[in-house]
Image: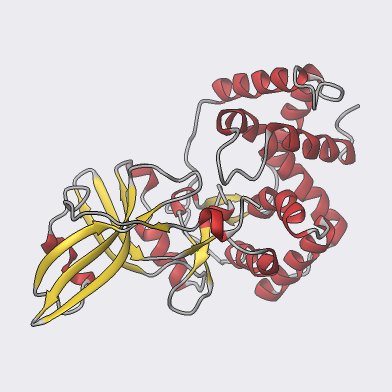
Amino acid sequence: MRFVPAQLSPLPVTADPGELPYGLVWDDLCPCLPDFDRPIDARRSYRKQGINKGTNSCILTLNYRAGREGRSRTLFFKNITDPTRTEAAKHRFLAAHGVPTPALRHTIERPGAETLIFEFLPIIGIEPAAADELVALIAGLNAVQAPPNALFQPNPGLPKAEFDVGVRTALQRLAGNAATARFVRPDRWFRSYKRVGEVVTTLPVALNHGELHYQQVGRSTRDSVLVLFDLETTALLQRFTDIADMLPSLSMFTGRSEHDLFAVYLRELRRSTGVALEESAALRELRLVRAVRLFWSLPWLFAMAGEVGMRDSPATAAQTLRDDLSELGLLA
């Protein structure tokens, strides 16, 4: 399985000492190095796996002196230069409201950049037995009350007309794919895409990660609790966004039905909010949200096909989309 920790967790490597990244100096790091006296060296001690291999983050082992004692601390660094995607304030808010996130050891803010330093997570992803834990984590995020609108506004993304062109092109590619040609009708599906998009804008919203995958969760070194990270896309979105994104692959991953997993989610949401949702109405809302999310994902899935850590292919997404559109009565 490509979602398990063995294929998503960082791999230890042997590296020579190097320079600190992102223009940092050792004095910047004092707040996250207990009893720091003077530096010894910094080494890139782990290689990232999965699809998040960009240069804006790295894992460093910092070796330093605390008086006569030599010490070592491994930390995760993330550098953000887009002011619309900063994360520190989101991490602080979620941690204060009981959502498990990695410990934020230090934040360095400079003109044009925010560098976050987190505890190192040696385990990324989950095993199938932890599915309920992941579902509970999603429900707990969705249940957060009164998140500030200004902090959790969705990123604007591409202009709608440009995005629609990408969706239409992806549908045409599916119609030419041997696995999906027999049921994908691009013009009909594009009309369904427009209809479902209009309905989804009227649905309730809640806090969601927005781009949740198995590589956005890991085990804290403090207590092995499952934590959520990469919060730049966390925003007020349709309330079933994250669970809709995760259910198909989570069902395949665990061998459990989507109905069973969604029932766990509704139970956890009720426990966190005190509100019981009617199951059939909630399931229809889930299908609406998932349908529009799957349409949006198609261009990206074609671009990322074959990457380790991908939970879907364009064909599997199209099969789920066909089932949802049929259940919603939107393929006629």
Q: Residue at x 24, y 58 (%)?
A: 43
Specify the quadrant that holds the C terminus.
top right
Instruction: Give the tally of numbered discs.
Output: 0
Q: Residue at x 27, y 70 (%)?
A: 73
Q: Residue at x 43, y 67 (%)?
A: 102
Spot occupied by residue 82 in the image (x, y as percentages of width and height): 33, 41
In this image, 20 relative to 47: left or right? left
Nearer to the camera, 186 or 239: 186
Spot occupied by residue 252 in the image (x, y as percentages of width and height): 76, 52
Identity of the residue furthest to the front in this view: 14
Q: Is residue 193 above or below residue 88?
A: above
Q: Is residue 164 above or below residue 103?
A: above
In this image, 302 relative to 89: left or right? right
Identity of the residue furthest to the bottom in this view: 68
Q: Is residue 149 above or below residue 310?
A: below
In this image, 131 relative to 224: left or right? right
Q: Residue at x 84, y 62 (%)?
A: 278
Nearer to the camera, 198 or 191: 191
Spot occupied by residue 23 in the image (x, y as percentages of width and height): 16, 48
Q: How is the image coloured?
A: secondary structure
